[in-house]
Image (cartoon, rainbow, N blue to C red):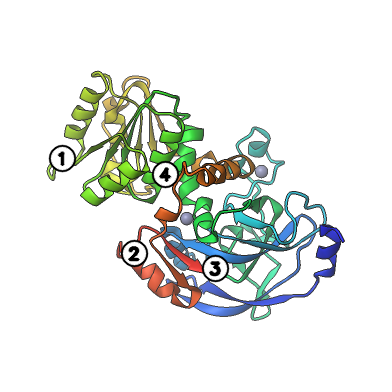
Amino acid sequence: MDASEKSFNDREVLRTRAAIANGRGGFSLEDIEVAPPRLGEVLVEIRAAGICHTDHASLSWKRPLVMGHEGAGVVRSIGTGVTHVKPGDPVVLNWAIPCGECFQCGRGSAVLCERSRPAHVMEPSAGHAHAGGTLWKGRPVDRSFNLGTLSGFTLVQAAAVTSLGPGVPFASACIVGCGVMTGFGSAVNVARIQPGESVVVIGCGGVGLNVIQGARLAGAGRIIAVDRRESSRVTARRFGATDTLQVAENDRELRAVAAVVREMTGGRGADCAFEATSVPQLAFTPLLMIRDGGMALQVSGINDPVTVEMPWFMWNKTYVTPLYGGCVPGRDFPRIFEHYRRGELLLDELVTRSYPLEDLSEALEDMMTGRNAKGVILF
Ligand SMILES: [Zn+2]
Ligand SMILES: [Zn+2]
């Protein structure tokens, strides 16, 4: 019996538990029903789901939503036309789901896809396409980023899953689908760090540490990690920083740090610098750390208005806000997992604590109060 035959026999609607955001700042654990996959869709049994600040934000997105956008699990069944995974395969999910056909997908920018779709797509209403394959109280309910990984099962487009291969624990795999990809990809795909280049990383939390790992694997000559906390600087060294810099209490614009960076880089400035702090006032500070013609990257998703002195851009400096590290799942995930298997990329160390779904409130609270670098829900 081949895989497609099995999926055809796997026709039952599954009931499972899910965390559903109420759109007004709260959530509850509910029973949902998940339909079997149709053409080009995959049904995944979730084993681990990472929690990040976006999940907390999603509580207030003004409509009910199956929460979660980071996940790893096992393929339960596949619809016709799905060839890159089969039932039983361990997989990781990606939250930017390329359609493969639109303007952006056509020019190789899968991450900027203009037609990302849920499974069992229904006609657009209120400006976005709705999921039809997941029912709550008998009615279709949307999934966060068309994934909704905080549920026992998720039904997704085939382009949302990538085979994991052997030897990667689900808790470590699920975080690759968001923060790891964002940091690693920003270094490798967007900054395109070359062997021997000098790199500055401001902020050594989850994303910053993965920028550091990406820079190390790209062969950067000097990786200068900047953080106020000593514990973070120690961790940064473990992930590959060659130098660490402390920030003085009164150094609000990091001008003193920038002066040291210039000293360390032949008076010129680094080839590229990353802001990974989420502190709006620091959004443009990477510009102070780089050489003329260098690249500054803001990878922490700052949304607030910030002012900047235009001379900071002089001369020929590029400022980029990368989305999802330029992720092409089929290219990047296997590469990240291969690095992990060879012991070259740390994943297990990024997970602070795991929880059952029943303790999601506590997991969100631990994240918001800064007790966790990364919390993971295990199913
Ligand atoms: Zn597309
Ligand atoms: Zn995330």
First along the sequence among labels 2 and 4 = 4
Q: Residue at x 37, y 47 (%)?
A: 302
Mark 4 and mark 3: Cα distance apart in space: 24 Å
Mark 2 and mark 4: Cα distance apart in space: 20 Å
Q: Which residue is mark 2?
A: 368
Q: Which residue is mark 3?
A: 150
| Comparing labels 4 and 3, the label whose residue is closer to the camera | 4
Q: State the residue in front, 146 or 43.
A: 43
Q: Amino acid at mark 4?
A: Asn
Q: In the image, is residue 217 above or below residue 337? A: above
First along the sequence among labels 3 and 1 = 3
Mark 1 and mark 2: Cα distance apart in space: 26 Å
Quadrant occupied by the N terminus: bottom right
First along the sequence among labels 2 and 3 = 3
Mark 1 and mark 4: Cα distance apart in space: 25 Å
Q: State the residue in front, 126 or 118.
A: 118
Mark 2 and mark 3: Cα distance apart in space: 18 Å
Tell me the SS state at disc 1: loop
Q: State the residue in front, 172 or 132.
A: 172
Callout 3 touching callout 1 (CB < 8 Å):
no
Q: Which of the 4 image quadrants contains residue 271?
A: top left
Q: Disc count in the image?
A: 4
Q: Which residue is mark 1?
A: 251
Callout 1: CB less than 8 Å from ligand 2: no
Tell me the SS state at disc 4: helix
| Comparing labels 3 and 1, the label whose residue is closer to the camera | 3
Tell me the SS state at disc 3: loop
Q: Residue at x 40, y 68 (%)?
A: 364
